[in-house]
Amino acid sequence: MPKYNDMFELSVEDMDLIETSLRHTRDALSEAHPAAGSADAETLRRVHALLGRLHNQKIFYYPKDQVYVSG
């Protein structure tokens, strides 16, 4: 049984392309209004969850020598 490769060499640009593609897929599936329980609804849920996991892995930088003001 083959094993999965768990070491990926993706650039920031690669990740941006993946995230953009997932957003387009999400938007296309959302416009179709898939019925609950359908294959498209399940795909939409999985794409949305994956976008959330990608977002949670990002590192956001804040100024260290100044007070951070959001927005």
Image: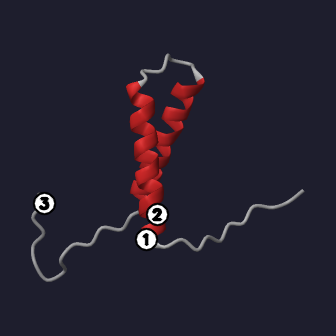
Residue pictured at 48% horizontal, 73% vertical? 11
Placement of 26 over or under 34, stated as above or below: below
Q: Earlier in the sequence, mark 3 or mark 1?
A: 1
Task: Please give the residue where the numbered disc 2 appears in the rendered image.
Answer: 15
Given the image, on which type of amino acid does mark 2 rest? Met
Task: Please give the residue where the numbered disc 3 appears in the rendered image.
Answer: 70
Q: Report how far apart the C-alphas of labels 2 and 3 lie in the structure.
A: 25 Å
Q: Which disc number belongs to residue 43?
A: none
Task: Please give the residue where the numbered disc 1 appears in the rendered image.
Answer: 12
| Residues at marks 2 and 3 touching, judged by CB atoms closer than 8 Å | no
Look at discs 3 and 1 and give the one toward the viewer: 1
In the rendered image, is residue 57 in sight?
no
List the single residue furthest toward the right: 1
Q: Report how far apart the C-alphas of labels 3 and 1 lie in the structure.
A: 24 Å
Residue pictured at 42% horizontal, 21% vertical? 33
Look at discs 2 and 3 and give the one toward the viewer: 2
